[in-house]
Amino acid sequence: MVTISEGALEHVVTIMMDGGMSPDVFYLRVGVKGGGCSGLSYTMDFVDEVTDADEIVDAGAIKVAIDKKSLLYLIGTELQYSGGLNGKGFQWVNPNASRTCGCGESFSL
């Protein structure tokens, strides 16, 4: 399943609250789409509706929606966050990726 580190969870909740989105109503939607320099790119967005085709992960303070197609690429992946002067922001740690780009926003299997 997909997990979210404590630091990433705190940052996502902060972004939601700053944007006027209640974690009780909105979901963090994560997914995968074709593109990027390695072939597949990670996606993140906030949504207030989910479908029957979504897998819902309870991450504590938030719920995460993942379409079943993307879930195949994301099983075992952790979303992390690194802040500070040298921080990279959100980072995906995906054990399924055989290659990632330098910025970490795309991967291939």
Image: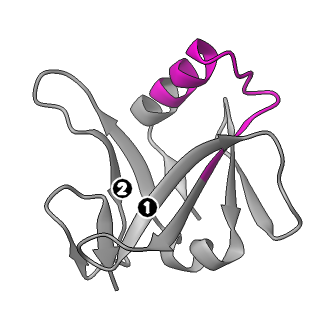
Residue pictured at 19% horizontal, 67% vertical: 101
Q: Which amino acid does label 2 sit on?
A: Trp
Alpha carbon distance from label 2 to label 1: 8 Å
> Which residue is under mark 1?
42
Please state, as top left, top right, bottom left or bottom right, where the N terminus lies in the image.
bottom right
Q: Which residue is drawn at 43% across and 55% down?
A: 78
> Does label 2 or label 1 sit earlier along the sequence?
1
* Image disc number at residue 92: 2
Where does the image place residue 4, in percent across and percent down from the top left? 50, 45
Q: Is residue 25 magenta?
A: yes
Screen quadrant of the C terminus:
bottom left
30 left or right of 35?
right
Q: Which residue lies furthest to the right in this view?
A: 52
Q: Any magenta on residue 3?
A: no
Q: Is mark 1 on a helix, strand or loop?
A: strand
- The residue under label 1 is which amino acid type? Tyr
Q: How crowded is mark 1: few (under 14 residues within 10 Å), some or many (20 or more)?
A: many
Label pair 2/1, CB-CB below 8 angstroms: yes
Magenta highlight range:
11-29
Residue 70 horizontal/vertical position (percent): 58, 73
